[in-house]
Amino acid sequence: MHPTQHYSPETYKARSSVGYLIKRAAALGIECIEPAIEARGFTFTQWVVLMYLRDGLAFNAKEICLQLRHDSGAVTRLIDQLEAREFVRRERSVDDRREVKLILTDAGREMVELLIPTVVERLNFMLRDFSAGEVSELTRLLHKFIGGFGAAGNTGDGAGTEGGE
Amino acid sequence: MHPTQHYSPETYKARSSVGYLIKRAAALGIECIEPAIEARGFTFTQWVVLMYLRDGLAFNAKEICLQLRHDSGAVTRLIDQLEAREFVRRERSVDDRREVKLILTDAGREMVELLIPTVVERLNFMLRDFSAGEVSELTRLLHKFIGGFGAAGNTGDGAGTEGGE
DNA sequence: GCTTAATATCTGCCAAAGCAGACACTGTAT
DNA sequence: ATACAGTGTCTGCTTTGGCAGATATTAAGC
């Protein structure tokens, strides 16, 4: 069960590493979309949180922390801002009074729907030279990348005995 | 000349958007590699800068700003730290005295080489379920994504699977 | 019922990053 | 030479994110 060696220390170069490329692609993508979001008075992160709530990717602060990979304190303050502007409402859960359920207000939902066409347009623009097959393959590979080790332990050691082609 | 419509506002969902997936992949990748870097006393960003200098992706602060997509002030302070620890040296350019050339010291180069095997191991771990063809295709698609609209000085090589097996 | 551990959220403090402006230097035109 | 625009770097000020600790609630053990 020798592990697959896609890279080796002797020949490793940043510019051909998927680590470098993914990081750079993320930065360029945000840079492309962010101005459109900020023109409507939101930070990119605020927008992302509103989308998470709309799409049911998160229902409380904890889940937003996990999704965003952000600190819980940062998320608290982020929600504070969105709540102050009445795009999100906090509602203490009755089942578990530790939990605070986050609910998109009507204004919040309206704002998300208003912004989506712009974001979609930007995404389509970024992918304008891609065929449908390429987008679908990129999506598949990114899903695999995320699922492959996001779920399995990534705790610093070589615990990965799962998988194994 | 109708643009390719990979996404449409009516059906857009965060979890299937390459924007969301790339951002998440980047976050997970950093999360996987960062602990190994910090165990050696560096922040992830400091590591990246050292790699850029090693691989000639940047020679001065301006180029690091463009590569990292960071503010020039942030980069100045980042270089301050690396210079204080003597991994990087500032050298005023004689051709253009506005420019400050950044040079990896011997200690800096040594440190990079010391860290590379760990980073390579982590990358290979993240990609352990990927075939060589998949890594190469992911690399190609990310290059295309970046080059397509980034338009930055991207001396692409396109190849992914160096290092063989 | 009381104690302890775990969970969800929030608050204070510090570091990192963005923004705007200052400064130094270059190149060009007058 | 002087003036002016453009560029690279650096410095304050503010915002954001990370870390640690506090509070409130739940769950399990005695």
Image (spheres, coloured by chain):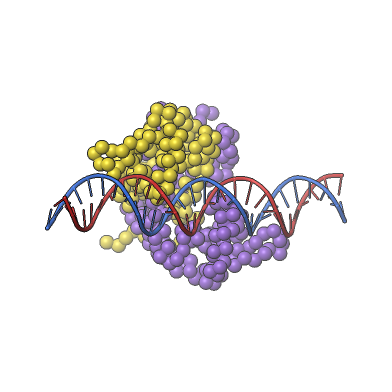
Chain colours: A purple, B yellow, C blue, D red
Q: Nearer the viewer, residue A100 or A146?
A: A100
Specify the quadrant of the image occupied by residue B103: top left
Q: Percent from the top left, x then y, of residue B4?
A: 34, 58
Q: Is residue D18 left or right of residue B131?
A: right
Q: Quadrant of the N terminus of chain A?
A: top right
**Tag count in the figure?**
0
| Residue A5 x/y as whole percent | 46, 31
Q: Position of residue B42 (x, y in %)?
A: 49, 37
**Picture residue at 55% right of the left edge, 44% below the top:** A150
Task: Say whether residue A25 is left or right of residue C1.
Answer: left
Quarter of the image where one finds residue B100: top left
Q: Mark yes or no: residue A8 visible.
A: no
Q: Nearer the viewer, residue A143 or B77?
A: B77
Camera-side residue: A42 or A13?
Answer: A42
- Give how far across and how far down residue A78 sits, in percent: 55, 60
Regarding residue B39, the answer to whether it shows in the image is yes
Residue at the image point whose x is 54% and y is 50% from the top: A69
The foreground one among D5 and A46 is D5
The outermost residue toward the bottom is A106
Horizontal placement of D26 versus A37: left or right?
right
Say which residue appears at 69% left-offset and 58% top-offset: A98
- In the displayed structure, would residue B86 be above or below residue B17? above
Q: Quadrant of residue D3?
A: bottom left
**B165 to B42, vertically: above or below:** above
